[in-house]
Each structure stands twice: as structure tokens, then as C-alpha cells.
Amino acid sequence: KPVIVLSADRPYRGASPKDQQSLIAAREQTHTALIGTTRLGKRVIIENSSHDIPVDQPSAAAIAVFEAMQMRERAKTKD
């Protein structure tokens, strides 16, 4: 099954630099683990976005949904 992980380029704007470093490390680990759950996984960094990507960049979320649908259809034809 396709998995597209959207990652904000500015997710922790209000956090201190020390906290940001820890939060970013945890996010990287989590996002990598999610992508690794399927052979159809990928990560996309969304520019000019905070944690609330659907509000900050709604087209990015819509494109990801469409792309996941296409990935699934292509995978069906290969199986």
C-alpha cells in the first residue's frame, strides 16, 4: 500500500533551538519508520509549512492523496 509522508519544513517554530533539535530527530526517525512499512513509501518536504500542512499548503495534501491513488493503481497492474 502506498504511504506518502508529508513533512513540514518549519514544524517547530515556537520551540527553543535545543527542543527543535530533539523534536526534529524524533520526527526523522518516525517518518523513516513509516516510509519503511511499504515498498511504495516516500517522503515529501512541504515548503512554507508548519505542522498544519493541510491549512498551510492545502494543494500539497491534495496532490499527495492523488499521487497515492495513482501509486496504488500502478501497483495493482504490476501484481
Image: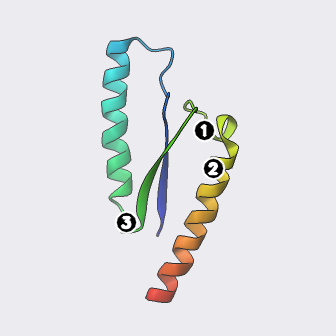
Looking at this view, is 63 or 20 the one in front?
63
Q: Nearer the viewer, mark 3 or mark 1?
A: 1
Residue located 63% across and 49% down the image? 61
Q: Is residue 63 above or below residue 71?
A: above
Q: Which residue type does callout 2 highlight?
A: Ala
What kind of element bears circle 1?
helix
Q: In the image, which disc is placed on residue 38?
A: 3
Q: Which residue type does callout 3 highlight?
A: Thr
Disc 1 target residue: 53
The percent coordinates of residue 45 (x first, y second) are 47, 43
Residue located 44% across and 87% down the image? 78
- Left or right: residue 53 versus residue 45 is right
What kind of element bears circle 2?
helix
Residue located 52% across and 72% down the image? 71
Given contact means CB atoms under 8 Å apart, are the residues at marks 2 and 1 in contact? yes
Q: Quadrant of residue 47?
A: top right
